[in-house]
Image (cartoon, rainbow, N blue to C red):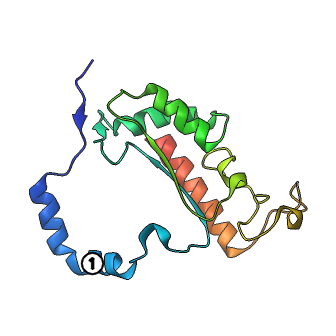
Amino acid sequence: MTPLRPKVIPPDVQASVYEENKTLYNSFQWGNLKGDKSVIGATVILLAACQDNQTAADGDRNGLFTEHLKDVWNGGRFLGCYYDFLRAISLEMPPTQTPNYYTVGASNPAFESQEPFSISPSTTVPDQTPDQVPDEPQGEPPTSDAYRVLASFTEELQALFKAL
């Protein structure tokens, strides 16, 4: 087995890129002083390659996490929710790299229980109560611009996974 190597940007490259983009980066940092406490109108799930106190290992073509993610994803044949997906990936990882499941924004158990990388028009919007949303999709899928953008993004993401 090939020894694990960390996936890092050399410090001199980090410094150079930061200096070139300092104004932009600082505007993001100082424009979002609330950080994790910012109110956002969505549920975000982060599937991270490792914990904050760890370094992600690199692979031959992708990072080690991405290689295992693709194996578990199995061309879209994985069955389960996001948490199950990350747990299955974690079982393939070395003990020195533990993937992280982290959510930000409104609590949305229906979204978290979806099959990864899918869009379900019946998912409860965070500011709705369960009795305001039908149990099963009714009629045609939503045709809003936001839904079309998300559907297009999902197709691109699935094509990206196939290409990796």
Q: Relative to 148, say whether 161 is above or below.
A: above
Residue 51, image quadrant: top left
Q: How many discs appear?
A: 1
Residue type at the position of mark 1: Asn
Q: Quadrant of the N terminus?
A: top left
Q: Relative to 111, say whether 63 is above or below.
A: above
Q: Quadrant of the C terminus?
A: top left
Indicate the position of residue 130 as horizontal and vertical percent values. 84, 61
Classify residue 100 as left or right of residue 24.
right
Q: Residue at x 24, y 22 (%)?
A: 2
Q: Nearer the viewer, residue 64 or 161?
A: 64
Indicate the position of residue 147 as horizontal and vertical percent values. 69, 67
Indicate the position of residue 152 as horizontal and vertical percent values. 61, 61
Q: Relative to 67, say whether 53 is above or below.
A: below
Q: Dot 1: within a 10 Å radius of its alpha carbon, few (fewer than 14), some, or many (20 or more) residues? A: few
Tell me the SS state at disc 1: helix
Q: Residue at x 73, y 55 (%)?
A: 120
Q: Residue at x 65, y 60 (%)?
A: 107
Indicate the position of residue 86 as horizontal and vertical percent values. 53, 38
Q: Relative to 161, say whether 73 is above or below.
A: above
Q: Nearer the viewer, residue 152 or 68?
A: 68
Q: Residue at x 32, y 31 (%)?
A: 96
Q: Residue furthest left?
A: 12
Residue that mark 1 sits on: 26
Classify residue 141 as left or right of residue 153.
right
Classify residue 87 as left or right of residue 94.
right
Residue 83, image quadrant: top right
Residue 98, image quadrant: top left
Q: Residue furthest top?
A: 1
Q: Nearer the viewer, residue 75 or 28?
A: 28
Classify residue 72 as left or right of residue 142.
left
